[in-house]
Every structure is written in structure tokens, then in C-alpha cells.
């Protein structure tokens, strides 16, 4: 499969600058890199975004994540390899990514569980990472970006 067009965020320089600024802000939010990698990977799995799953796994491994944990992200609820904070971030990622699946996608219960482990600034970083990942998942679906492509 070949992409229909070059990634729009690369074609439009101002878009790429905006994305980079959001990503920079996320990295300054105080959430650990491994947690943000898990958030990115889980949203990409849910959305079936092959290039983001590929790139996310590659990035996570480069940043010290283990194969064992990465293989279990898709079934994180059944795994004992994730901390309570990571579980809260993964739950928030799932409900935020699947907003059309239920009337109140991000329930007070899910939000409160995340807020037990993350302060407001960290929650903002996680929510922005979820949003940025979902944006790229949708761009890649529309443009048919092939798996194996990295950024």
C-alpha cells in the first residue's frame, strides 16, 4: 500500500509547527515518557492505525520499554505488568478514544481514577497526547499511510 498523499502535517509547514508545539507541551507536562508511550500505543491499537502502532512500538523500545509489556498493552486489564497510574492512564485513553461508544464517554469514575495518580498539569498532558494520537490516527487512515513509516 502506498500513501495517497504526503502526511498533511508535513505538507503544511504551519500545521507541523503546531503539532510540534503541542508535542513539546505534552513532554513538559510531567508525565513519564513510558506512560505517554503506552497512551499513544493504546489509542493507536484501538483505532487500528498501523503506522502509529509500528512507530509507537519502535519509539517505546528505544525509550526503554520492554517487549513483554508492549505485547500486553492490548490486554492491559488482564496483565499484572502495569502500575495503577499506568492503568488509570490507559483507561482514560480508551474512553477518550472511543467517545462515540457511550453517552458519557469519560465518566467521573474514570476521570477520578486518573486524578488519583496525576495532577492537573499531568492530566492535561495525557489528554493532549490522546488527542494528538487520535488526530494522527485519523490522518493516517484518510491518507492510507502504510505501516512501517516512521516520523
Image (cartoon, grey):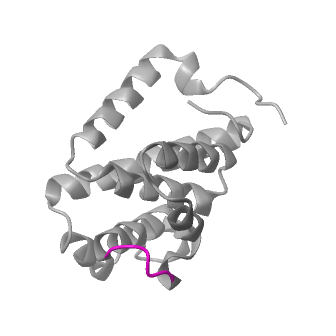
> The C terminus lies in which quarter of the figure?
top right
Q: Foreground: 56 or 22?
A: 56
Q: Is residue 81 magenta?
A: yes
Q: Which residues are magenta?
A: 79-83
Looking at the image, residue 55 lies above or below residue 77:
above
Judged left or right of residue 66, residue 111 is: left
For the image, the number of numbered tags is 0
Residue 93: quadrant of the picture? bottom left
The percent position of residue 22, horizontal first and vertical second, equals 33, 35
> The N terminus lies in which quarter of the figure?
top right
Looking at the image, residue 57 lies above or below residue 68:
above
The percent position of residue 23, horizontal first and vertical second, equals 35, 36
Looking at the image, residue 70 lies above or below residue 144:
below
Judged left or right of residue 10, residue 3 is: right
Q: Residue at x 49, y 62 (%)?
A: 97
Looking at the image, residue 61 lies above or below residue 85:
above
The percent position of residue 58, horizontal first and vertical second, equals 56, 44
Residue 82: quadrant of the picture? bottom left
Q: Foreground: 88 or 5?
A: 88
Q: Foreground: 82 or 137?
A: 82
The percent position of residue 131, horizontal first and vertical second, equals 42, 49
Q: Residue at x 36, y 58 (%)?
A: 35
Judged left or right of residue 2, residue 84 is: left
Q: Is residue 62 magenta?
A: no
Q: Main secondary structure of the magenta part?
A: loop
Judged left or right of residue 35, residue 10 is: right
Residue furthest out toward the right: 1
Q: Residue at x 33, y 55 (%)?
A: 127
Q: Residue at x 42, y 50 (%)?
A: 64
Amino acid at each position: 500500500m502506498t500513501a495517497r498523499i504526503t502526511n498533511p502535517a508535513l505538507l503544511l509547514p504551519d500545521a507541523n509547527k503546531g503539532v510540534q508545539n503541542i508535542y513539546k507541551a505534552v513532554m513538559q507536562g510531567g508525565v513519564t515518557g513510558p506512560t505517554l508511550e503506552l497512551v499513544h500505543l493504546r489509542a493507536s491499537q484501538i483505532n487500528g492505525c498501523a503506522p502509529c502502532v509500528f512507530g509507537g512500538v519502535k519509539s517505546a523500545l528505544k525509550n526503554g520499554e520492554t517487549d513483554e509489556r508492549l505485547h500486553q498493552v492490548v490486554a492491559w486489564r488482564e496483565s499484572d505488568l502495569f502500575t495503577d497510574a499506568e492503568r488509570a492512564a490507559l483507561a482514560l485513553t480508551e474512553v477518550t478514544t472511543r467517545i462515540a461508544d457511550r453517552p458519557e464517554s469519560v465518566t467521573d469514575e474514570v476521570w477520578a481514577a486518573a486524578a488519583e495518580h496525576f495532577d492537573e498539569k499531568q492530566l492535561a498532558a495525557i489528554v493532549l497526547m490522546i488527542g494528538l494520537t487520535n488526530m494522527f490516527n485519523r490522518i493516517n487512515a484518510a491518507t492510507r499511510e502504510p505501516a512501517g513509516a516512521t516520523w
